[in-house]
Image (spheres, rainbow, N blue to C red):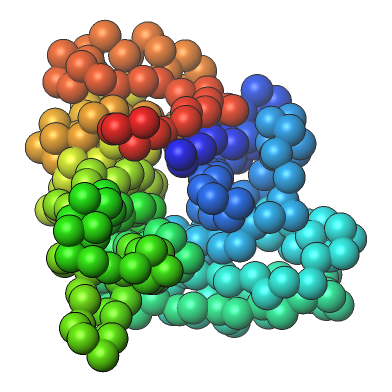
Amino acid sequence: MLDICLLGTGGMMPLPYRWLTSMMARYNGQSILIDCGEGTQIALKEKGWSPNPIDVICFTHFHADHISGLPGMLLTMGNAERTEPLLLVGPKGLSRVVASLRVIAPELPFVIDCLELGEAEHTIRLDGFRIEAFRVNHNVPCYGYSIIIDRIGKFQVDKAVELGIEKKYWSRLQRGETIETKEMTFVPEMVIGPVRKGLKVTYCTDTRPTEGIVKHAEGADLFICEGMYGEPEKKAKAKENKHMTFYEAAELAKRAQVKKLWLTHYSPSLNRPEEYLPATKKIFQETEVCRDGKTVELVFEDE
């Protein structure tokens, strides 16, 4: 089970009814935060979720509306007596940017590790899932992220019994280990069935449409994408500022064959994004215009 919450859906500046864009994912006791603009802590508080279990914070880029909430978030974690290391992920220059922001949060009871992204694609493997970072097209270095939970096949008890494999070895085979006994060597493929469908969430903001987004969002259970502008006449402005319209995001979702599209990162001038939803749905039916706190619980197909 993977919980996803859009903590904020605004771009550029927080508004009284819209915090800046940030997403939190929770899986198997771990939490991943993507972007941390001004107001993210308040959005977390309003949602009733805690910053204490955040294991990783990924930054798409270093514009203020995506990172200015970090010092306060770090101080809150420190005041909660956190001692576990925190991993920060972002484009090159992350260590320098974090060091500058920490002028107002100099002493923390936990270690911060910075992973700087330089390549067009990068995979971060964590306990039970992986994060795929991919470069997008903004006016500063910027990345999108996919959170992917892979699933191995089911353990086939009948085959294990037929092969005479002792029960004490079953869990090790499930973990992918090879078992060597005096009589025989057992490999997981002997007792593990076909790979099952896992879960995938792809998140990107502040970019023009790219082939890389289509590639990395392909088949996603949920595609969270910026829709800076809903007004069709603002496509030229979107191009100029390296952003996207609702309709461009919907075209990406259609091409990537995702299950559902959530629009986010609205311009402060876009007061009623839902007005532009019917036209967007003509391109990709499973589109939702999201508000702060929008949450979904994704489950595996066989559960």
Q: Total number of numbered labels?
A: 0
Near-viewer residue (289 or 298): 298
Q: Residue furthest bottom?
A: 182
The quarter of the picture where residue 122 lies is: bottom left
Near-viewer residue (160 or 290): 160
Q: Position of residue 39 (x, y in %)?
A: 70, 42
Near-viewer residue (204 or 256): 256
Which residue sits at x=32%, y=76%? 177
13 relative to 295 in the view: left or right: right
Which residue sits at x=69%, y=31%? 47
Q: Position of residue 61 (x, y in %)?
A: 46, 62
The quarter of the picture where residue 201 lies is: top left
297 relative to 249 in the view: left or right: right
Does residue 100 appear in the picture of this structure?
no
Q: Position of residue 69 (x, y in %)?
A: 69, 54
Image quarter in which the C terminus is found: top left
Q: Is residue 295 above or below residue 12?
A: above
Does residue 17 appear in the picture of this structure?
yes
Which residue sits at x=25%, y=20%? 286
Near-viewer residue (184 or 32): 184
Which residue sits at x=18%, y=65%? 163
Q: Is residue 135 above or below residue 3?
A: below
Q: Position of residue 1 (x, y in %)?
A: 46, 39
259 relative to 148 in the view: left or right: left
